[in-house]
Amino acid sequence: MKRGLVVKRILIVDDAATVRMYHRGILESAGYTVDEALNGIEALEKALETPFDLLLVDINMPRLDGFGFLKELRRQPMPQPPAIMVSTEAEARDEVAAYRAGASCYLLKPVRPSQLLAHARLMLGEANK
Amino acid sequence: MSAFTPQPDPGHGISSEDFLKFREFFYRRTGISFEASKRYFVDKRLAERIESTGTGNFRGYFTLLRFQASGEELQLLTNSMTVNETYFLREEYQFQCLVDSILPEIVKHKDGSDPIRIWCIPSSSGEEPYSIAMYLLEKWPQINEWDVEIISSDIDTSILRRARQGRYSVRSVQYVPARWLAKYFKGIGDEYQLSDDLCQAVEFTRVNLSEPGDTANYRNFDVIFCRNLLIYFDDLSRKTATDTFYEALNPGGFICLGHSESMSRISSLFKVRKFPEAIVYQKTLEAR
Amino acid sequence: MGLVKGKAAQPAGNTTSKPASCEELAAGLESADAAVRRHAAREIPACADAGAALVSRLKREEEIAVRAAILTALIRLDDPVATAGLADCLRSEDVALRNEAIEALKELASSGDRAGAVPPVLASLLADPDPDVRIFAVNVMESAPHPDVESWLIEAIERDSHVNVCATAVDLLCEVGTEAAIDPLVRLKARFASEPYIQFAAGLALKRIREI
């Protein structure tokens, strides 16, 4: 299969159902395929099962938070997708912690559709689209 | 019929937004997720429960489900949404994972004089522990180098009696290969009797997983099979059960859950491990 | 070699051999040995002042299995000290500890016979000056069977100035909202007219409430 022709797959990791629906709507309308997980453990299960091209990860989640998920995923011997971390927390320490955990970029909630798509395209190497 | 055909009974009309709302709630609470194609199945079960509870419509029923302090209705609904049928070699890929991936890792860290211990809960009528026993004998060549103990537990003493007896219907053995059937079973009328050797190979015990006292001395296990049980527990019982498993496992030991289950609803005590055959959960080697 | 019949129960380790006194358990909670700490956490709820000792240890504990045992013990304990201690953890900088506390508070809030101390604490958390704490308080309500949940959520979307507190409350109103939430949701949409997420979430909540 030729890489460029394959629809890019994005995993949304968030415990809030409405947030998942909102992000899913935005990403699907741009032609991406989306899957969802409601915490870090489920995200890890899904990411180990099938490869994703991009992860959209909330920080505060039960059982395994976004930092814990990314740290664990980054340890796995597998191709590593970029991760956009989203959070409600404005403080700089969270942004630093996000990059340290292996995030590629950090967005504050609530995210605007244009902002999410711009970052997704950038992370997926489709910046010229 | 389209999957989105409304319920014939107008009193139970469940709208598509109701369905989505219910789906999110049920997924969050139980980890069971329904595709849109299951709409008819879900609506039917919901209509039955609306009827039995006398709540009249979806809205009244959802309020009961969401706000009932005992969580009893959620359990009843979960029961009606899941088909818990047991038979030999059900979810066989996990047994494959046991012999091809899990046991090879276990024996790497194990002293040859210690037995490998496997705990299988719930035992139900015994199909699962006996399947493991047969699988080990048939598919794990190193069985001749190790002692393996299989312990299987259930809360229900009458089902334990049936498990010890080892008598099964045709339906129950339908996926057992003919060669294994001839080797380990004897046909009696239209039933199958498991051989004494196999019946004797499994130790059956009565255990209530929510009762820490019952399991305080359950120790030194290398693998725990706990399939399709924890989905029926409330949060605190699930926590108690996973604490019990943690205590019962050796460092580096594994837990196998059912096909539709995930540790993500339960606990972060265990590491997610991906093997070619299955995803399982591991107590880290450093833990003690 | 091969299949052998084993015994389920194994000789217990020294940690379970004799009942320990409350002093021993309190000391055990601070032991260097994680297995001893775990055991102490499980046994200590029977002792007076267990809540304070457990919360104090929880904040410093690094071993995940010991944390799990402490959290289960606090849930079983279900007293005001345990609840207040968990609520205090919501302010922690440790993301994992915060989420563990939210989860434990959820469980305290979710079961009828154990729902004692949480609702008053929730009400005060919802008025906390830190918006993150208010968001966590809404998270705790997620599974609470308390009859006031909807009115608390309505209060939040009517008064809270922080968009993410409102967003979190609307998320839950999509599940529990009734006709009482319609006007507040409409006002919320007007208040955050340029915020696409609020438009989406409040619109969804309204759709679900109106569609019978």
Image: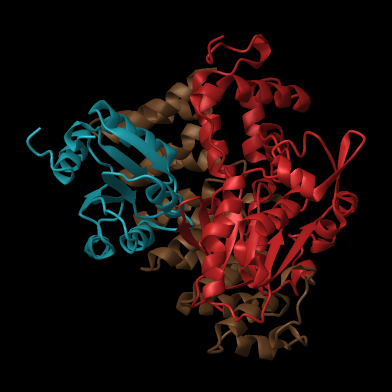
Chain colours: A cyan, B red, C brown
Residue B120: x and y in percent read 71, 58
Please state, as top left, top right, bottom left or bottom right, where the C terminus of chain B lies in the image. Answer: bottom right
Residue C17 horizontal side relative to residue C82, left or right: right
Is residue B251 placed above or below C164 in the rendered structure? below
List x then y, in percent, for residue B113: 66, 82
User: Residue sitting at 61 percent across and 90 percent down?
Assistant: C27
* Residue beneath the point at 53% across and 48% down: C141
Q: Residue at the right extreme? A: B189
Q: How far across and down, in percent of the image, does residue C35 sit?
A: 60, 82
Q: Is residue B125 visible?
A: no
* Front one among C108 and C94: C94
State the image coordinates of residue A41 (x, y, percent, origin top left): 45, 54
Q: Return the residue found at the far left.
A: A128
- Image quarter in which the N terminus of chain B is found: top right
Left or right position of B109 against C146: left
Picture quarter containing residue C76? bottom right
In the rendered structure, the answer to whether residue C87 lies left or right of residue B52 reads: left
